[in-house]
Each structure stands twice: as structure tokens, then as C-alpha cells.
Image (spheres, rainbow, N blue to C red):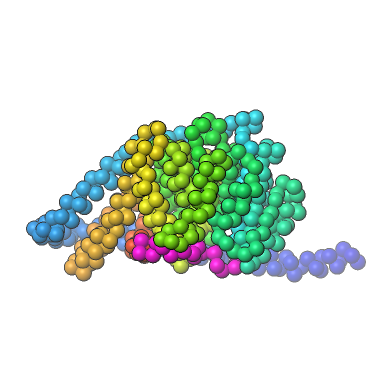
Amino acid sequence: MGTKQTNVDEKPNQLKNLTTGLKNLITNKTGRTWGFLVLVSTFLLMANAVYLFYLLQSDFYEFNIKQSSSTFGMIFLAIGTGLLVFKVSFFIYTLYKYFCYKPIESVSDEELPTCTVIVPAYNEGKQVWDTLISLAESDFPENKLQLLAIDDGSKDDTWEWMLKAKNTLGDRLEIFQQPKNQGKRHALYRGFNHGTGEVFVTVDSDSIVNKDTIRLLVSPFVHNEKCGAVAGNIRVLNNKKALLPKMLDVSFVLSFEFVRSAESTLNSVLCTPGALAAYRSSAVFACLPEWINQTFMGKPSDIGEDRAMTNMILKQGKHVLFQRNAYAYTNVPEKYKGLYKMFIRWGRSNVRENIEMSKYVFTNFKKDSKVGTRLLFLSQSSEIIMTYPFLIFMLFFVIAHPLLFISSTLVSTLIISTFSMLFYANRYKVSESFWAYSYSVLYTFALFWITPYAIATASKSGWLTRELAVKK
């Protein structure tokens, strides 16, 4: 009788699982179809733009002649040409430095330093459990690994999932709960003060790491005594769920594996990502009071804590490196609203930290060569400084010659994004590399306003993307 009852009870569950499976299958098929249509539309748009640009060559030539005949046009053309030459030269230099880069191999268990991993969490739900379990499964000596998780006053069930992780991992995990939401910086600050490791590793609560990630991430500290921080390699975790994550995955690969690889050869990675970064504890404590009390325009800084920490460690004359072989997979926004909010936060942080960097980058802040660090600063700063002049020119171009603007912009986008596509295809799947084109079109026409807005609102605070307490 007991066996029959069990079989009866299993039928509703089997039906539920079947229904869920069918829904997932339909969703996946719909997603693939929609993705195919987006890619086809992108290429049709690009092809039409190339043809239109070919037809409008004479108009484009006349427009340039007309602009160069005026004083304002000549000044803008000279500045634009100068910046173009600088950017092309800098790209070639970056490409050369990329080929010079090699990730550092793992050191032995005996050589590994003691390590404190800090996971701040806010409204993360079940994902924090997955993050903590993946960290606990790391191929790192248990007696050298301290794992801390801090709930920053979440409004959802994040704390309950931390308690479950604690029950599973026992003494291997320490959990703390902030009395109220104070921001990621304060959660990390608590972890830094409680941690005992020679190296601090910070991991976002929506990230998953490989078994060898922590080991590989901290190995550069053993090889290089001047190393103060190391940036991990970030890939997109939810890139199978929606179109935006697919596009962002291609963008992340270029940003990390190309840009940060080149920056690493200059010992000057400008930002160690919150999703995965490591810091020598002595370097952290040397700037911790300044970091936790940092302000901008008289207001406490509650964003850009990763970029700020990196900046302060660079200021100490320390090396900041990148480990391409140390992977973390993180969730990114799947909707446009979440995406632009994330970019606004990054943009504001970029403006703030470039201002801070300008205060020391041309001083004798380290004994090593400072040329590479200064070139990186000039490249980023030039983009910020020229944002509004180019925005004004763009609006003038749109009003005066809309077809010429659209065709020339799309052709430029096609040329630039082709490098991103080829780079991704060489490193990973060719089939996924074509999202580089869709992302470039999206960014050019739907996200171009981010940088101007971020500059204008750089003093504003707020995380923007973690207020919705969604159970995952």
C-alpha cells in the first residue's frame, strides 16, 4: 500500500516537471528565433548602411569641404583628427601590449598566501547560496582560506540563504548581518576589518567561480612583491537567458581579455572588478581610512568602491595586474532599464576616479616607469573631455544630414565592432561572436546618452540596480 501511495504522489510532480520542461523548451525556441531575427536585422541594417554610404560619398565629401571652410569647422576638424590619430596609435600600442601579456601560472599549496574571501550581498536571494558553495568548492587549502559573507540589510530572503550555507559549510563560513543597508563599501569594510588573510578576495554575491579561480587569482602576489591588486576575468553567467547578456558577454571579453591584458603589461589595470578581485592586505590597510571616508563634492561615495580601491593602490606605486585564467561568471541585467542603470553607475564612477587620478598621475608616485599609466589616463580622460563637443557635433550632423549621419555612423560601427567580433571568435565560439555587431548598434543608438548624463550627474549617489527584492 505504501508503494502505491508513493506512485500516486509522484504523478502530480511528474506532470509538473513535464509542463515546466515544455515551457522551457518553448521559451528556448522562442529565444533562439528572436535572437536569429535580431542578428539578421543587424546585418541587413549594416548592409543597407554600407550601400547608402556608397551612394552618398559625394555628399559626405561636400559636407567635409563645407565644414573645413569655417573657423569653427577647422578647429573641430583639427581636434577630431588629432584625437583620431591618438586613438589609432593607442590602439596599435594596446594591441602590441596584448600580445606581450601572459597569465601567471598557479603556485604550489605551500607557496599560496593565506586568503580571506569577502562576499557582500544585498537582495540577492538564492544566488548567494550558489556563490558561497562555489567558493567553498575551490581548489585552495582549507587551512589557508577564510570565507566571509555579509548581508547588507537585505529586504528579501538573502539572510535565510546565508544561514543555509552556514549550516552546510559549518566553520568554513562566517556570516554577518548589517543592522541596516549601508552600501557595498561598508559591507566590504566590515569584511576587511574582520579578515585575517594576507590577501583579500572580493566576490559579488551573484557570481560563480571555477575551482581553480581563487588559487590562480592570488598567485601573482607570490611572483611579484610589488603587486598590490589583481583583477579577475569576468564572463556573463546568464548569457543563455536573454539577448542583452549575450551581447554583454562579447563586450566583457573585449574589455577584460583584450584591454585589461594590455593594461596588465603596464602594471596599471585601472579597475579591479567587484565581481572578482584580489588585494594585498597591507595595500588595503594603507588606504582603508581614506577609502571608507571618500567623498565627492561633499557627499559620501557609495558607488565605484572597486575603482576607488584600485586607484588608491595605484597611487601607492603598487602594481595592479590581470589574471586571464581566473574566471568568475556573473549575472548582468536582462532588461534595458537595468542595463542603463548599471552603465550610469559605472559612468559616474569613471568620472569621479579620473578626477582623483589626475591629482597624482603626473607626480612621481612610483619608482617604475609611469608612461603607461599616464597614457591610460589620457585615453580615458580624452573620452570624457570630448563627450559634450562630440555630442553637439552629432546633434548638428543629425539635423543637417540625417541620412549621411546614420549611414556613416553605422559604417563606423561595423568597422569597430568587427575587431570585437574577431577577437571573441578567436577566443571562444564563432557563432556567439556576431553579437558584437548587435551590441555596437544598441550602444551607439540607445546608450550613447549614458556618458553625457553620467558626467552631468556625477555627484549623485545610489546603486540603482539592487532595490527590487526579487527571489531567485
Picture mark count: 0
Q: Is residue 383 magenta?
A: no
Q: Is 404 above or below relative to 320? A: below
Counting from the top left corner in percent of width and height, residue 92 is at 30, 40
Residue 417 locus on image (x, y percent) = 34, 51
Residue 379 shown left or right of residue 23 in the figure: left
Residue in the picture at 60% in, 58% down: 121
Q: Is residue 446 above or below residue 427?
A: below
118 or 403, which lies in front?
Answer: 118
Q: Residue furthest right?
A: 1
Instruction: Give the residue displayed 63% in from the left and 41% down from the top.
Output: 197
Furthest residue in direction left, as rendered: 69
Residue 212 position in % (x across, y down): 60, 40
Tell me the residue at 62%/48% (across/down): 193
Answer yes or no: is residue 13 visible.
yes
The residue drawn where x is 46% and y is 50% is: 307
Quadrant placement of the N terminus: bottom right
Residue 168: x %, y % from top left: 75, 52
Magenta residues? 455-472
Q: Nearer the viewer, residue 184 or 98?
A: 184
Residue 431 visible in this rendered orientation of the protein: no
Image check: 112 left or right of 417? right
* Left or right placement of residue 17 versus residue 270 in this view: right
Q: Quadrant of the C terminus?
A: bottom right
Q: Look at the magenta stretch and give its main secondary structure.
A: loop
